[in-house]
Amino acid sequence: MVVGIIAEYNLFHNGHALQLDYARKTLGADKIIVALSPDFTQRGEIAILSKYERARIALELGVDLVVQIPVNSATDSSLGYAYGSIKVLDSLGVIDTLLFSAEDDNIDILSKIAEIELEENDTYTKAINSSLTQGDSYPKARENAILESIKTSNSEIKSNIVAKILNKPNNILAIEYLKALRLIDSSITPVCMKRTGSSYNDDVIDGNIASASAIRNAIKNNEFEQIESVVPSMAYSLYKKCYSNSEFLYPNDVSLMLGYKLLDGDFTIYKDCNKELSNKISNELSNYTNMTSFRSLIKSKNITESRISRVLCHILLNITNELYIESNGKVYPHIPYILILGFNDKGASLMNQIKSNHTLPYFTSINDALNYDFNSRERAVLETDIYATSVSNLILANKSNSIITSEQSRLFLKV
């Protein structure tokens, strides 16, 4: 069995190790493939470590092969993130099972919610439009529409149970994975593992499993004694070394480059940025000091801080609407290729199968991808991926006062 996992590993911790252990021991996985976020994340923030460092850690700690999620998907909304990630994994042609974690592991209820959203019946459509008209954010409007659809259906699922499910971030992502599997008509079987320990946004470290955000905060404050029990020992040693070498990056490290890009004016060419938000960014630009304070400044009842963060990231990285495709009135990230970041010996044994079964072109180096005969939109996705890594590398070089290997000069990792 080959199990696929979608991850940011920002940073890798004991919860991730537990998931890999579940794949091996409970599911009986022979090999594990991870679709990894690049140098920017779904939150719209720069990753704390480069994609190659995070890929190396994953390979050292039990993953067999790592592929990159293109940046137009990795920084998209939860559905776009799920769609692009699963498209990459499915296109390898070797994965049997998708493993993900959620606060509630009742996959039947999660699947029912996914089905409601995909069907978008009259009840759902009227409810979501009503909420948006009243000034609710899209996530709130979506929640209201799902609950209204449950109430008016003959489903045995209780609406109060669904409401609790929809208030937990990993449940939301699990639902999007299930939707994405159906959207691309994938034969991959979904398996949900119950998430244990701290919640996604919990900043308190207690016990041996903590959230990635809590670990990042502790590292930023040089409180390494707090994280020793919640990350694998190999990762702990590397994190201390990276801290000493000033190799950790934080959201506001992009502030100077972003501020320069915000001088451009009209931002409606960028994904998720309508005229209202574009005007709001322009009108508040005189109050810009850094990325995190600016996104807090312009958030509102109907525009969440998460969406603003993604939009600012799209502006920084030139992620325009050109990098997305429309299908049945919905917009999804265009995924034209697969970049393999690295593998171990077991992962190397998968390469012949991938060669026989892949449905998208795959590459182990960016130079090979640059020499491929892509059309203009496909090449734009590739060039944006390269640009995103170059932005991260430039910030890292400045912060660590060191020369960073360019994307074009890199070879895939072999662990």
Image (cartoon, helix red, strand yellow):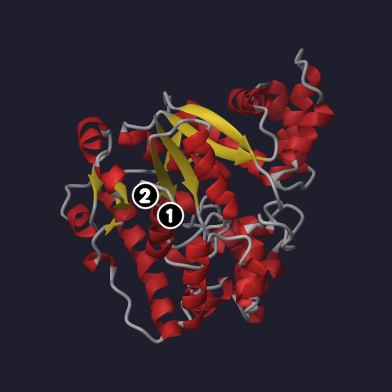
Residue 394 is left or right of residue 80, and the answer is: left
Where the C terminus falls, by quadrant? Answer: bottom left
Of pointers 1 and 2, the one earlier in the residue sequence? 1
| Residue at 65% in and 22% down | 108
Q: Residue furthest bottom?
A: 401
Relative to residue 185, is residue 243 depicted above or below?
Answer: below
Q: Position of residue 255 (x, y in %)?
A: 54, 77
Where the N terminus falls, by quadrant? Answer: top left
Q: Position of residue 171 (x, y in %)?
A: 66, 39
Please say if the residues under marks 1 and 2 sit with CB atoms less than 8 Å apart.
Answer: yes
Residue type (three-letter) at the residue carrying disc 2: Val
* Marker disc for residue 58: 1
Q: Residue furthest top?
A: 154
Residue type (three-letter) at the residue carrying disc 1: Ala
Name the quadrant containing residue 145.
Answer: top right
Relative to residue 221, is residue 110 depicted above or below?
Answer: above
* Residue nearest the observer in this picture, 310 or 199: 199
Q: Residues within 10 Å of mark 2 (few under 14, many from 20)?
A: many
Q: Position of residue 388 (x, y in %)?
A: 39, 64
Answer whether residue 310 is visible to the viewer in this image: yes
Q: Residues within 10 Å of mark 1 (few under 14, many from 20)?
A: many
